[in-house]
């Protein structure tokens, strides 16, 4: 009886039938989603695009990966345009290009059928995200009940995003040591995508919010999350789901 542990990829990562035969193709596709794509959101989006394309090929009677041509990819994207926005269609094309490039370099395919396909033109002239003006931001921050550590935390978190335009994830990933004073001015260190870090100066109001919240959270280690949940005695990192709740 053997005690060897055999690691098997999750069911969600298993290649769809179009990319299964032969075994080296299935292995190469699995390597793409496990070894090449590090971001969970990108992996999920690429998986959805790949599965949707495989299902489309199955409906059209395309059973072999080697039979996929550029006009098939173009027709697939054209069908998507009726149900999805232009950015979503472009994301599908980008996912297929990346996957097919990986298969070409792995000598599974001779050419990339998605390489010659042009994406749908999409130009953003004005952002859709609404930005609070000064009076609205002040009214929002003043409306928060700061009689408890929860209120102080919420005011500090919202104030951080209002004054620095920090992403939600970047704010939630901050440690206590990421807020510091240098040259009589407060600074916050934001950890963005790709390992990039940005030091952003704090306005006086934001310094006040952070100082009062951290003082209420006395005893926090420098490496501990600056924004923490109160569900378990304020010991856990405040997640994005808990923040919305």
Image (cartoon, grey):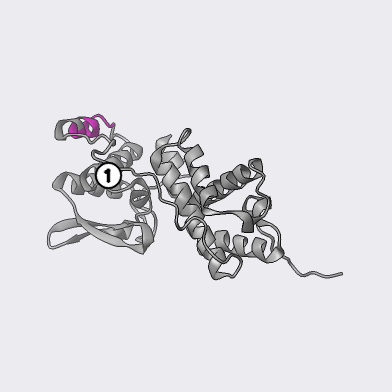
The location of residue 167, given as percent across then percent down, is: 32, 47
Q: Quadrant of residue 86?
A: top left
The location of residue 197, given as percent across then percent down, is: 30, 62
Magenta span includes 36:
no
Q: Quadrant of residue 174?
A: bottom left
Q: Of 187 and 19, which appears nearest the observer? A: 19
Where's the N terminus, which quadrant?
bottom right
Magenta span: helix, strand or loop, mainly? Answer: helix
Disc 1 crowd rating (10 Å Cα; few below 14, some 14-19, many 20+) is some
- The residue located at (57%, 66%) in the rendering is 110
- Secondary element at image label 1: helix
The location of residue 163, given as percent across then percent down, is: 21, 45
On the rendered structure, is 117 left or right of 28?
left
Q: Residue furthest right?
A: 1
Magenta span includes 138:
yes
Q: Residue furthest left?
A: 184
The magenta-colored residue range is 137-144
On the rendered structure, is 224 left or right of 204?
right
Q: Which residue is mark 1?
A: 161
Q: Is residue 229 visible?
A: no
């Amino acid at each position: 009886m053997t005690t060897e542990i055999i690691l098997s990829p999750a069911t969600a990562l298993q290649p769809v039938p179009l990319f299964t035969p032969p075994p080296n193709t299935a292995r190469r596709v699995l390597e793409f989603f496990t070894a090449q794509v590090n971001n969970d959101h990108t992996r999920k989006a690429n998986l959805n695009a790949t599965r949707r394309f495989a299902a489309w090929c199955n409906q059209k009677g395309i059973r072999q990966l080697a039979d996929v041509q550029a006009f098939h990819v173009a027709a697939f994207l054209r069908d998507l345009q009726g149900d999805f926005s232009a950015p979503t269609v472009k994301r599908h094309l980008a996912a297929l290009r990346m996957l097919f490039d990986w298969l070409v370099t792995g000598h599974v395919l001779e050419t990339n059928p998605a390489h010659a396909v042009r994406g749908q033109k999409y130009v953003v002239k004005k952002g859709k995200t609404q930005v609070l003006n000064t009076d609205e931001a002040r009214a929002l921050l003043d409306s928060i009940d700061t009689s408890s550590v929860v209120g102080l935390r919420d005011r500090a978190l919202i104030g951080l995003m209002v004054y620095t335009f920090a992403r939600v994830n970047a704010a939630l990933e901050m440690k206590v040591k990421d807020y510091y004073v240098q040259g009589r001015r407060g600074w916050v260190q934001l950890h963005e995508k790709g390992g990039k870090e940005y030091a952003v100066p704090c306005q006086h109001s934001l310094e006040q919010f952070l100082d009062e919240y951290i003082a209420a959270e006395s005893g926090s280690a420098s490496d501990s999350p600056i924004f923490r949940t109160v569900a378990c005695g304020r010991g856990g990192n405040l997640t994005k789901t808990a923040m919305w709740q």
